[in-house]
C-alpha cells in the first residue's frame, strides 16, 4: 500500500472517537503518511517499524528524536 492510499484509507475508516491509530505489519509504506494522518485525524499514529526503532534508540541509550515521522519519534525514548 502506498502512503497516499494509506492516508486515504485512514481518513475514510478510522473513527474519530479512538485515542490512536496503530498500523501493524511491515509491508505497508506507512512512514510517508504518518505525519499527514496525525494532522488530519488529530491523533497519534503508531506503526510497528516506528515502535521497533524507538525501542532500539532507548536500548542503545540514544536520546535522539526524529522529526517529521510522527509524534512517537518526536519524543526521546526513556534512557
Image (cartoon, rainbow, N blue to C red):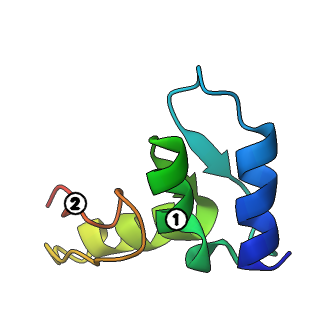
**Quadrant placement of the C terminus:** bottom left
Mark 1 residue element:
helix
Residue count near mark 1 (Cα–Cα under 10 Å), binned few <14, some 14–19, many ≥20: some
Whether residue 59 appears in this view of the structure is yes
**Which residue is found at the position 38% from the left and 64% from the top?**
55
Where 37 sits versus 65, above or below? above
Q: Which mark is residue 36?
A: 1
Q: Nearer the viewer, residue 61 or 20?
A: 20
**Which residue is found at the position 17% from the left and 55% from the top?**
78
Q: Quadrant of residue 18?
A: top right
Which residue matches tag 2? 75
Q: Nearer the viewer, residue 51 or 3?
A: 3
Viewer-nearest of labels 1 and 2?
Answer: 1
Residue 45 x/y as whole percent: 52, 52
Residue 16 x/y as whole percent: 61, 27
Mark 2 residue element:
loop
Q: Earlier in the sequence, mark 1 or mark 2?
A: 1
Amino acid at each position: 500500500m502506498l502512503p497516499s492510499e494509506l492516508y486515504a484509507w485512514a481518513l475514510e475508516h478510522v473513527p474519530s472517537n479512538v485515542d490512536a491509530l496503530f498500523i501493524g505489519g511491515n509491508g505497508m509504506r506507512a512512514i510517508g503518511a504518518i505525519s499527514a494522518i496525525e494532522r488530519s485525524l488529530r491523533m497519534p499514529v503508531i506503526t510497528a517499524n516506528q515502535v521497533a526503532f524507538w525501542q532500539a534508540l532507548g536500548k542503545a541509550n540514544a536520546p535522539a528524536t526524529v522529526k517529521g515521522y510522527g509524534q512517537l519519534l518526536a519524543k526521546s525514548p526513556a534512557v
